[in-house]
Amino acid sequence: MAYPSHLSAGEIEEFGREMDAIRNEVMDSLGEKDRQYILSLIRWQRSMALAGRIGMMLSLLVSPWSELPWAGWPAFLVLLLGGAALLGISKIIENMEIGHNVMHAQWDWMRDPNIQSNTWEWDNVCPSDQWKHSHNVIHHTWTNVLGKDPDVGYGVMRVTGLQKWHPQFLFNPVINFVLMLMFQWGVALHDLELDKVGKGERSVESIRPMLRRVGWKVVRQLRKDYLLWPAFAAAIAFPVAMLLELNAAPIALAAFLTVVVGNLVANGIRNIWSNMIIFCGHFPTGVHHFTPEEVEGETRAQWYLRQLLGSANIEGGKIFHILSGNLSHQIEHHLFPDVPSNRYPEMSQRVKAVAHRFGLPYNTGSFTRQFGTTTLNIWRYSLPGGSAGH
Amino acid sequence: MQESGSLFGRVTRLAENISDAFAFPLKLSHYVELVNPLWTSHDMQARIVKVWDETATARTITLKPGKNWRSFKPGQHLRVGIDIGGRHFTRTYSISCEPEREDGCFTITVKAIPNGFVSNHIVRQLKVGDYIPIGIAQGDFYLPDAQPVQPLFITAGSGITPIMSMLKSLDAEDRMPHVTHIHYAPQQYDVIFAKQLAALQKKYPRYKLHCIYTRDPGGVDTPEGLKNQHFSQAQLEKYCPDWQTKDVYACGPQPLLDALESFWESQGLRRRLHTERFRAALSVSTEPGQTGTVNFTKSQAQFEGDGTTNLLRLAEDAGLNPTHGCRMGICHACDSVLKEGCVRDMRTNELMREPGTIIQICVCTNVGNTVIDEA
C-alpha cells in the first residue's frame, strides 16, 4: 500500500495547496537573475566543450611519437585525459542541467527563441522529441506506476519487489553495468519500448519512423565525435609531421585514434555520471511504487504526493547540484518539473518543511547512501521475492 | 542569398555544412558567438554604439549590425528583441537614418510612451556595449526608387522617424525634390530631430516644413488647444494648397492616420496616401468568462470559446486533435504560441496577452477572441 494512511483526502488536498503556493511564488519571482544563470551556464558549457577539444588537439603536440622536446607519456596523458574530462563534463552539463531542463520548458518563460523546449536538440544520441515524449509526458505523468512508467526498470531490470520476478532478471547486475557504460544508447532506445515490441504488444511497424529518427541523430553524433574531429586532428598532424621530418602517415593515424579514444572517454564519463545520478532518483531504498488501480482518479494534490513519495534526493554542495543537473533535487524536480532548476535548492528547504509537518517521508541522503542502496537493490531484486510494500 | 546553382554557392554551403557538423547539434555560429556576437549566422545581433537624447522622452540608439545585415530602403522598419526582467519582448521600430551611412551602422529613435514598459526600458536602460537581437529591415513604406515624387509628408510625434530616414537619404543622394512636410508636436522642444530639420530647411528652400504645435512652451495641453490643432481640411489647404496632386506619406498615432485615411478616401484619392502604422501589439484585457472566437492557425480552424473550458477540450469538441500529453499542465506537450488576443491560465488566473507567449492549451481558456499557433 503506497499511500500513507494517516492523511485523509482533505489533508492531502491541503498538502496540494501548499505545493501550488510554493510553485506560484517561485514562478512569479522569475526574472533577470534567472536568465543570467542559464545564459552564463550555456556560455561556460560551450567554452568548456571547445577547450576540451582543443586540449585533446594540443595533446598531440606532446605525444610520445612527436619527438618534440617536451613530449612524453605523462604530459600527453594529462592533456588528453584532461581534455576528455573537460569535454565529458561539458556534455554532462549540456545533457543534464541545460538540455534536460530546457526541454522541460523550464526556460520557455523567457521567450528567448534560442532557448526553447520545442527546438532544443541536445548533445546525445537520443532525439529530443522522443525524449520529451518518453520523459516529460510518460515518466512525469505516470511516475513509479508499475506497468505504466517505463523508467521502472527501463523494461530490462527489476528494481522493486512489486515487479513480478522472471529468470531474465538474474542478469540485473550485468545489465546495470552495461547500461551504465552505454547509458546514452539506452536513452536513445527508450521511447521505442523495445520490451513491448519483443513481447508482441507493440508492432515493429509503429517504431519504424522512430528508428529512422534515431538513426538521423546517431549518424550525426557518431560522425562528429568519431570521424570529423579525429580526421581534423589527422589533417593537422600530417603536414606538421612532415615539417618535423617524421613518418607522416602513421603519425596521422595515431592522431586520429588519439582523438577517437579521447571522445570515447568523454562520452563514457557522461554516460557513467548521468546514469549514476539518474538511478539515484527513483531506485534508492525508501522510494514508493504504485499500482495503476491506486492512482485511478488521482487529483492534482495526490499527484504531488505521489511525486514526493516516488522520488529521492542526494545531498551535496553547489557544484555537485549543477553537475547533477539538479537531479540531486529529484523530489523538487518531480513536484515542479517546469520550474527553472536553479530554484530547486531554495524550494527543497520549503518542501522538506511541509513534508515534515504532514508527517510525510522526505527521501534524502549522501551520494554513497543513495547510490549504494540503489546498487544493492538492483542486485537484491535480481533474485525472487522482496518487500511487497516497497 | 546564394543562387542554388552556382558553384561558389554550393561550395560555400558545403563548407558551412561540414563545419556545422563539427558542432552538431549546435552550429559553428554558436561557438563563434562566444568570441563576437556580431559574427553569428544563426541569429543576428547588433551592438549599441551610441545613445543620444533627441527630446525629453525620445532617444536615438545607434546600432552596429551583425554580419548578415542587408541594406534597407529609407522608411522601412525592423524588429528588435529586448530582454526585460529575464523575458524577451519583440518590438518593431522604424529606422531613422539614411542607408547611405558610411560606418555601416543604423539608428532607431524610440519615444518612451506613458505606459509602455518596453519603450521606457529602451529609452532609459539600454547602454552602449549592449547586444540586442535584430531582424532584417522590412516594410513597404518607402519612396519609389525611380519615379520623381513631390511628396507631402504628414507626421506626428515619433511618426517622424521613417520620414527622417527618407529626408536624410534624399539629402545624401542629392535628389531632394519639392517636399511639403506637416508635423504635429506638443511644442517646439518636443520635435524630434528639430535641429536637423532646421538645417534641411536652410539647405533646401524647396523643403517646406510646417510644425503645428498643440500647446505653447511652458503651457498645458488643453482639450480646446488640442482640438484646434487636429488634422483638418482647412489646415491642409493652408499649408499645401496643391495637396490633391501630391503623393502623401504619413506616420503617426492611430487617430491621425484614421482621420487621414477617411479624408483621402472621401476625396477618392485613397491610392495616393501611404501610411505606416505603429500598431499596438497588446489587446484589451477583459473579464474572465468572456466568450469569443478561437482561431487555430495551423489547422485553419475556428470555433467558439466560452472562456471557461480549456482550449484543448474546446478544440477536440470542434473535431480537432491537437498535440497534447498529460492534459494537466505538467508535460508541456501541448505548448502553443499565442498570436493575438488574450488567454487565461486557469490554474493561476493569470492573463496572458503578449503575442509570442507560449501557452499550455490544456490549462488555458480564451478571453474574448484569440488566435493561436497550435503545437
Image: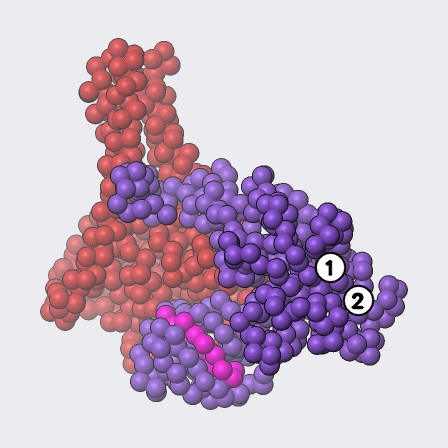
Tell whether position B370 is magenta: yes
Q: Which chain is purple?
A: B
**Viewer-side residue, A74 vs B272:** B272
Residue on which the image places disc 2:
B213
Dot 2 and dot 1 residues touching (CB under 8 Å): no
- Name the foreground residue: A251 vs B274: B274
> Which contiguous range is marked in magenta?
B363-375
Q: Percent position (x, y) of residue B202?
A: 76, 49
Residue under pointer 1: B209
Is residue A61 shown to the viewer in this render? yes
Note the chain letter of the red one: A
* CA–CA distance in space, label 2 to label 1: 13 Å
Which residue is drawn at the image coordinates 70% and 54% (left, top)?
B206
Any part of residue A17 in sight: no
Q: Is residue A228 magenta?
A: no
**Mark toward the viewer: 2 or 1:** 1
- Given the image, on which type of amino acid does mark 2 rest? Tyr
Question: In the image, what residue type sits under mark 1?
Answer: Leu
Q: Is residue B350 above or below residue A177?
A: below
x, y percentage for residue B132? 56, 50
Q: Which element is circle 1 on?
A: strand
Q: Are marks 2 and 1 on the same chain?
A: yes
Q: Position of residue A252 (x, y in %)?
A: 23, 23
Residue found 53% across the figure and 88% down from its top: B289
Q: Secondary structure at mark 2?
A: strand
- Give the answer, above or below, for where B288 lies relative to A274: below
What label does residue A341 carry, if any? Answer: none
Instruction: Give left or right: position of B352 versus A280.
Output: right
Question: Is the residue marked by circle 1 packed among few (<14), some (14-19), or many (20+) residues within 10 Å?
Answer: some
